[in-house]
Image (cartoon, rainbow, N blue to C red):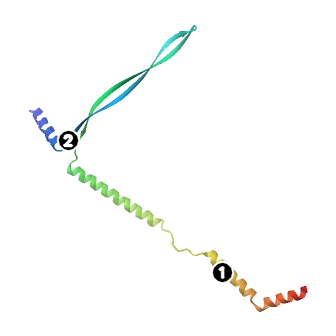
Amino acid sequence: SSERKAQYHYRKALKNGLKVVQDSDTIRITSVDSFPVIKNDTIVWEKFFTKKDTIIQFRNVYVPKTRWQTRIEYKERIKTKYIEGKTQWKTAQATQTVKYRVNWWFILIAFVLGFLARFIFSSTFIARIQLLFKLWT
């Protein structure tokens, strides 16, 4: 009969790793009621909160994965790792920086100092300075 077949398959699944877990959870239901109350010839609405706790029981069934399912999950995981590695390599390649940069300020200052030293140590410059001192004295 079909009931026996179902029991057979259920027992076989339990042997191969099926887990049936009885879980329960508590839900709190809050309801708001309002009713009229007469105070000093006026109608005032009073709010009344009621809380009820209910316990819900349900079965969690853990069905073990087949070899085929685990194989496909493994392949997907490997593919995503491969793609992540490729993207990291591409981003690192795109953001390469030049490790050696020429310090242009140093070269410019050295050029200006060299030009001034050549100008100062020339014989005409020294002669002009001596002439200037003679004119002042």
Taking 59 as reference, is 64 above or below it? below
In the picture, measured across the screen, residue 124 lies left or right of residue 93, that is right
Q: Residue at 38%, 27% (x, y): give it.
A: 28
Please identify the quarter of the rendering in which residue 78 is found. Answer: bottom left
Residue 18's tag is 2
Secondary structure beneath dot 1 equals: helix
Task: Identify the residue at horizontal 36%, vertical 28% (top origin).
Answer: 27
Q: Quadrant of the N terminus?
A: top left
The vertical placement of 36 against 6, above or below, is: above
Few, some or many C-alpha atoms within 10 Å of disc 1 (few <14, some 14-19, many ≥20)? Answer: few
Residue 114 in picture, x, y percent from top left: 68, 84
Indicate whether 88 appears above or below 30: below
- Say which of 37 and 79 sits in front: 37
- Disc 1 marks which amino acid? Ala
Q: Position of residue 9 (x, y in %)?
A: 14, 39
- 34 relative to 130 in the view: left or right: left
Q: Which mark is residue 134?
A: none
Classify residue 120 by image quadrant. bottom right
* Image position, residue 98 (x, y; %): 51, 71
Q: How many marks?
A: 2
Give the labeled residue for mark 1. 110
Judged left or right of residue 55, residue 111 is: right
- The residue positioned farthest toward the top in the image shown: 41
Q: What is the secondary structure assignment of the residue under circle 2? A: loop
Residue type, label 2: Leu
- Camera-nearest residue between 73 and 30: 30
Residue 32 picture location, percent across and down: 45, 21
The answer for how far apart the CA atoms under marks 2 and 1 are is 82 Å
Residue at the outermost bottom position? 123
